[in-house]
Image: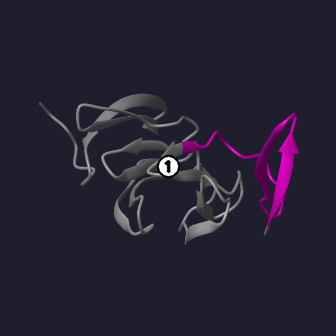
C-alpha cells in the first residue's frame, strides 16, 4: 500500500491505493483519522491520518468485507459482510467487542443514543436489532 501526494483542482491532498483494489465502502472521519475497510472480500480495516495520509493503524478482521464505518464516542463501529458486528477503539485499533449476527450482513450499522442498530438475517427473514455500545449486548429497553 502506497500513499501519494495528489492535487485535486487547486487543492493539495493525498491518496492511497488499497490492495488488491476491491470496491471500498464509504469511510468515516473522526479524531483526525480516516477510517475505512479494505473492500469487499478483504479482511482489512485501516485508520489513516486525515492530514498526512500516513497509516495510523491496520486491523485484520476474522471475517471478510468490512463495511462502511460509523464513529461513536472514541470508537468505530462496522460490520463484516460475512457475519460480524465490530466495535474498535479509534485511537489504537483495538477490538473492544464483536458479535456474530448472520450471513450475509450487507447493511451499514447506524448509531444513536449509545446503541447500534443493525439489520441481520435469521430463520429465513431479516431483523432489525439494537445492541448496547460498546459491549454489543442486546438492548431490550
What quarter of the picture does the C terminus occupy?
top left
Between 47 and 66, the one nearer to me in the picture? 47
Q: Is residue 9 left or right of residue 64?
A: right
Q: In this view, does 83 lie to the left or right of 87?
A: right
* Rendered residue at 33%/33% (across/down): 129
Asked whether the viewer can see residue 43, the reply is yes
Residue 25's spot in the image, x, y percent? 66, 42
Q: Is disc 1 surrounded by few (<14), some (14 to 19) or many (20+) residues within 10 Å?
A: many
Q: Is residue 1 left or right of residue 124?
A: right
* Segment colored magenta: 3-28
Residue 102's spot in the image, x, y percent? 47, 47
Residue 29's spot in the image, x, y percent? 53, 44
Residue 5's spot in the image, x, y percent? 82, 57
Figure check: 17 above or below 23: below
Q: Mark 1 points at which residue?
A: 79
Q: Is residue 10 magenta?
A: yes
Instruction: Give the residue at the far left of this rendering.
Output: 141
* Rendered residue at 23%/38% (across/down): 114
Asked whether the viewer can see residue 80, the reply is no
Between 17 and 131, the one nearer to me in the picture? 17
How does the figure colour the protein chain or chains? Answer: one colour
What quarter of the picture does the N terminus occupy?
bottom right
Amino acid at each position: 500500500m502506497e500513499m501519494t501526494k495528489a492535487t485535486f483542482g487547486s487543492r493539495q491532498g493525498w491518496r492511497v491505493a488499497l490492495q488488491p483494489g476491491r470496491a471500498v465502502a464509504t469511510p468515516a472521519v473522526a479524531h483526525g483519522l480516516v477510517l475505512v475497510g479494505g473492500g469487499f472480500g478483504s479482511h482489512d480495516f485501516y485508520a489513516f491520518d486525515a492530514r498526512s495520509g500516513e497509516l495510523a493503524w491496520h486491523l485484520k478482521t476474522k471475517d471478510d468485507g468490512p463495511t462502511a464505518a460509523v464513529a461513536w464516542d472514541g470508537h468505530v463501529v462496522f460490520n463484516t459482510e460475512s457475519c460480524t458486528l465490530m466495535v474498535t477503539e479509534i485511537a489504537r485499533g483495538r477490538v473492544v467487542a464483536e458479535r456474530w449476527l448472520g450471513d450475509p450482513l450487507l447493511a451499514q450499522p447506524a448509531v444513536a443514543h449509545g446503541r447500534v442498530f443493525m439489520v441481520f438475517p435469521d430463520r429465513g427473514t431479516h431483523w432489525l436489532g439494537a445492541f448496547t455500545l460498546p459491549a454489543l449486548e442486546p438492548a431490550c429497553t
